[in-house]
Amino acid sequence: MITDLRRRLTIETPEGVAFTIYLAGPFTRFLAWLVDCLILQVASWFVYGIVAAMTPIVGNMGVAVLILFFFASSFAYRIGMEWRFRGQTFGKRLLNLRVVDSSGLRLRFSQIVIRNLLRIVDAMPLFYVLGGVSMLFSKRHQRLGDLAANCVVTYLPDNETPDFKQVLPGKYNSFRDYPHLEGRLRQQVSPQEADLLVQALLRRDSLDAAERVQLYQELGRHFREKTTFPDEATVGITDEQYLRNVVDSVFRGKR
Amino acid sequence: MIIDLERFVAQEQPYWDELQSMLNRMEQEAGAPLGLEDIKRFDYLYQRTASDLARISTFSAEPTTRRFLENLVARAYAEIHETRHTRDRLNAKQWILATFPQTFRRHIRAFHLTVIVTLIGCAFGALVVATDAPAKGVILPFDHLHGNPSDRVAEEESVTEDRMKGHRSQFSAELMANNIRVSITAMALGMTWGVGTLILLFYNGIILGAVSLDYIASGEIVFLLGWLLPHGSIEIPAILLAGQAGLVLAHALIGFGSEHTLRERMRVVTPDLVTLIAGVSLMLIWAGVIEAFFSQYHEPYLPYSLKIAFGTTELIMLYVYLARFGRGDDRAPGASHEMVTAGTPTQ
């Protein structure tokens, strides 16, 4: 059994359909925050350069602009970005994170403002200690600003469906000559086992060669125990091909 | 049972792609209205994708497709089920003339509490200075307040040149940034169940009380009023309003006597907090300008009577604004008392 250690939030819609959103942990959020800080720092240098160049013309007004810019940008950047890009700053975008309403509803402007203004408390006494502690102990990894604004920060999943052609290449499947055994196999393979198999094949190229052989060997042994096909159907085929045949028989259904 | 995943994906993919492109369009053009046909189509695609998700969750555990569908359904759900009254485009006139003062009055008890705590702080500060004069060196944060008030008044009134010349804009910006930061902190400290907010208000009261008594005891009450009233008549109420926002937040957090959940209570007060803190920020911008460009000039530059009259007028106008504007419409626009019923999050 595979255990997913990420915290998640399941929302049931009035239509009776449940969907799960995966919650971002403190470390990933810290990295996104760091990226945003770097962006703000660069922007500050840029504005500082412009104001410094204009000082002979604008005089003391330039210093006033700088003071107000440094103060406002710390809030305005995040509020503006999260409002414009539906819960994402550049840092969050880079790390595939998004702020969402904790009920799954659309994020409102007031929520964005409050979660960002309350950074002042989260940052207390220094370096976001209070916010960090709150995130560690909160069931939804929420800092105080998130709690007040009813927000959670989520991981965005990949926006693509899997390429099944990679798993089901359409080659000859020797198991198809034994429909009654395929039927038994479908009956005995649980959805979780089928999922495991698909994932193992989808990730084929990202696995180290020796470990891939070992993994497929162990999986092959496991699935061979489910249903025994005659030697004519299995002789001479590799463990990987055996697994592809199993996936084909399980997912393609009856033909 | 495991469904024929490849055929299922091939058959449904066009609908998912269509929903995804509609969602992308809606998210990029936030606020742009959809036509009736588009709305019907969007609803159909949402229902179809949701049912696909239900099928794949029931019959197959393939996680990548499920996560893809969950993401699509989550985004579409947010668009379809968001029924709360939203105001994407701010009506500045309506906000200034009605929403802000209405919001202030809606939480008037919290404001009364901030006034009481500040007054207790004032009394304490005055008591400390009256009984232990050297203690003002400890409780007052600014050096120029540590000395004898009469000496300071004599020094201020003997100035022959404009000391603020060339620094007024910078000083004004510093005041604005600092005061707005303090106000946001006063509100944010509501998350400490209001304890932090009350301490901050109490401490502000101590400073105000100590300074006031010090100047009054030295017979410099006219200078004190001329110095503090022009900006203080806006700045001090602004800090009180920020404290009010903090106590509103604390009340929602504690939920004393409420039958609603924490999430529901927070959802109700969030727009009000933003309204209050935005109003406070505007007040402090005004106060910052007045303090730098007006309050720091004393006789013989500016007669105290003029400064006192100006400050008193501001105070009366602020009272009228907060107490009277938008009356009779207090529960209408901006009265954010919606409760969420759709969507049931579970852990």
Image (spheres, coloured by chain):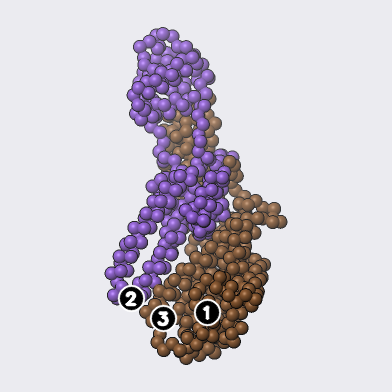
Chain colours: A purple, B brown
Q: Position of residue A98 (x, y in %)?
A: 46, 48
The residues bearing labels 1 and 2 have C-alpha atoms spaced at a distance of 33 Å
Query: Residue most toward the top?
Result: A231
Label 2 or label 3, whichever lies nearer to me, is 3
Q: Closer to the camera, A142 or B168?
A: B168
The image quadrant where one finds the C terminus of chain A is top left
Q: Residue at x 65, y 69 (%)?
A: B117
Question: Residue beneath label 2, please?
Answer: A59
Let me know if residue A66 appears in the view.
yes
Label 1 or label 2, whichever lies nearer to me, is 1
Q: Amino acid at mark 2?
A: Gly
The residues bearing labels 3 and 1 have C-alpha atoms spaced at a distance of 21 Å
Q: Closer to the camera, A207 or B301?
A: B301
Label 3 or label 1, whichever lies nearer to me, is 1
Question: Where B129 falls versus B195 (above or below)?
Answer: below
**Badge 3 density bin: few <14, some 14–19, many ≥20, Cα 10 Å:** some
Q: Chain of mark 3?
A: B
Query: Of helix, strand and loop, which one carries label 2?
Result: loop
Question: Residue beneath label 3, please?
Answer: B164
Q: Amino acid at mark 1?
A: Gly
Q: Quadrant of residue B17?
A: top left
Q: Position of residue B130 (x, y in %)?
A: 64, 78
**Badge 1 density bin: few <14, some 14–19, many ≥20, Cα 10 Å:** few
Q: Chain of mark 1?
A: B
Query: Of helix, strand and loop, which one carries label 3?
Result: loop
Question: Residue beneath label 1, please?
Answer: B147
Q: Position of residue B138 (x, y in %)?
A: 56, 70
Q: Chain of mark 2?
A: A
Left or right, B329 with reference to A76: right
Question: Where B6 falls versus A98 (above or below)?
Answer: above
